[in-house]
Amino acid sequence: MYEQLIERFIQKAYKYPKADQEKILGAATFADSKHENQKRASGEPYLIHPLAVGEILIQLKMDADTICAGLLHDTLEDTNTTYEELSQTFGQAVADMVEGETKIANLKTMNKSVQEAETIRKMFFAMSKDIRVIIIKLADKLHNMRTIQHLNPQRAKEIAGDTLDIFAPLADRLGISWLKDELEDLSLKVLKPDTFNYIQDYLLSKKSEQKAYLNRVEKSIYRACGDAELSDIIVTSRAKHTYSVYMKMKKRKKEIDEIFDILGVRILCNTMTECYTILGVVHRLWPPIEGRFKDYIAMPKANNYQSLHTTVMALDGKLLEIQIRTKEMHFTAEYGVAAHWSYKADTGSDSGSWNKMDNEQFSRIISKLKIWSNEIESSESYMEDIKGELLKDTIYVFTPQGHIVELPTNSTALDFAYQIHTEVGNHTTGAKADGSIIPLNAPLKNTQVIEILTSPNARPHLQWLRYAQTSSARKKIKAWLNKYDENILIDKDIIAKRKAPDHQQKEEQPQPPQPPMDDEHIVREVFDAKRVKFRVGEEKNMMIHIAQCCNPVRGDDIVGYISRGRGIIVHKRSCPNLKNMAEIDDRAIEVEWETEFPKLTKRFSVTSKRTYDLFGEIEGALRKHKGHLIEGRLHDDEEGKLRGTFTMEVEREDDFKKIIKNLKTIPSVITIAEIK
């Protein structure tokens, strides 16, 4: 039907062997016949999409099977094609990859976000068996993002958000840097069009000036390398991509004209030794900026990226980031895990030191994917694990014996201890970083030497669930507490606190419910111990269930109800059904969200006109966004106005911004500012 489109597409595969070209052509023709009358949101023939995905996979130099699966990736989902048909025509590997791409069937019980979450979970499983599944998915996502303007704005924003949260970090994890950069830029264009255009316009306005400057820099580097008898090098330069400039502005809280390291220069050479020689040449040419040198050759990133990074004070006193790497390292940096197939496809060779290194790095990534896959399978909140942990940047720390341990950014000594061994974690009493004692909840820093102090009598505490950042460490802490702490039951990310033994109860005085006041007691209420009739012993294996009537979600204020035969049912505290339940006072039990982290404490100053109830108005504004006023002081100034400082607790940075916005609407408030 669309022979010309297919003809134009197959010409892109001219580097592939004849047999591969025929197989790819067969898949394109098959896709054409299956998607015959289907149209995209833009009104174009649907076939344009699978052909574009195939083209991106050719650009990534993927093998013929992957390109075929890319061309056919929507056939199981959108046409009458069967798995058996694909398997017989194109082989089982292609059929399996297409199956891995297919969304979960649209079950009536699933809303769109649950369905998408389940599809992502399925994709992770398929990817742990064959990593090519995710490479096809990234190519699919890239073409969808390139043509996203045809969708309604709300849906486009949802897709762009997912791309930024999941798919761009995945491309980064797999080391495919150009794909990651383009996905980030396309997402920013949808989510913050004004910011995107502002940065683009700025970069465009500086283009000719930057080009002239970078030409001078390149000539200086070529000359200096020539003097050092390094002839076979390639120097390239560019401005950073839009999203990375945006992140620099956001991180440093600076305007674009205050960001000085927008320009980057890359030097490619042939051997690792030459990389370090060139580093010396560059540092003799221009002084390096202290603290801005990173050696990713000696310590590659988790995605196998290798390069030397240094920032120097270059010509005209401008800061310039320079990356130095071999051509093979550059190939891996651009293509990541896709390089594993492209090397073989390009050269037909399985020999050479690069190939040996590639196989080792590839195996490392595959084993990591399998670990991810297992973690997701047993995780209640796997979407948060994927976004918050699996796709986070990583740090490297050392054991005292010099072994490298890789952990997600913000990991603590407890995460490190449990990564070493469950028993080391369970008996931790303290930790040292570079010889100095550190708190168990302090985030570890890159390249620290971490020593764990243990004692046979030490044991996990409930508070450790707040300190541990990785789901694997939290899982081990939960398992220990469930098994050995008779007063606690943890299930479905909820902690139920068991009643203390009777003889202790007599000594305890009933306390009225109190609002949370410090980091140790977050989102908890102190209950009258006599009300809690939760028995220890035969009740050990009780289960926790989420009430269907009010469906509490993480962050809601919750209460547990012990039902006969069904375990603990968790309701929102505001659930209207609670008051009708039998013996509600006797059967209530204290429960809290296991993953609730300590709240943020914020201080702010206020100037206001004289008013009798400024405290009341401030407390009202805080309550709207789950804020809590800890303390406040007001005094009169010389001008007869009220001035004061307040301290509040909030759950998230965003809530604080909303509260400040709310406080500004109070008629009597003149100025308000955060105290850093």
Image (spheres, rainbow, N blue to C red):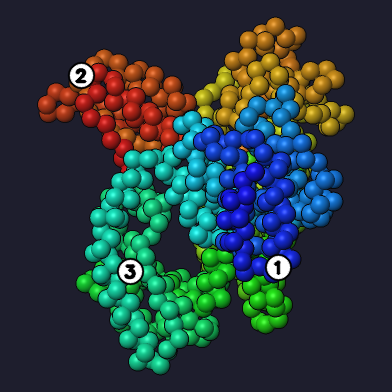
Separation of marks 1 and 2 at Cα, in angstroms: 85 Å
Query: Which tag is nearer the camera, tag 1 or tag 3?
Result: 1
Q: Is residue 22 above or below residue 190?
A: below
* Number of residues whose C-alpha sits closer than 10 Å to that of mark 2, classed few (under 14), some (14–19) or many (20 or more): some
User: Looking at the image, which residue sits at the far top?
Assistant: 580
- Considering only order in the chain, which callout, 2 or 3, is on the residue closer to the N terminus? 3
Q: Give the structural element (helix, strand or loop) at label 1.
A: helix
Residue type highlighted by circle 3: Leu
Q: Residues within 10 Å of mark 3 (few under 14, many from 20)?
A: many
Can you identify the residue that label 1 sits on?
Answer: 18
**Amino acid type shown at disc 2:** Arg
Compared with residue 643, is residue 410 higher up or lower down, i.e. above or below?
below
Query: For the residue labelled by badge 3, is the local secondary structure a helix, a strand or a loop?
Result: strand
- Quadrant where the N terminus sits is top right
Q: Amino acid at mark 1?
A: Lys
What residue appears at the point 57 percent right and 69 percent down from the top-left corner? 332
Residue 305: percent from the left, percent from the top?
Answer: 55, 67
What secondary structure is found at the residue carrying circle 2?
loop
Where residue 438 appears, x then y in whole percent? Answer: 53, 58
Q: Earlier in the sequence, mark 1 or mark 3?
A: 1
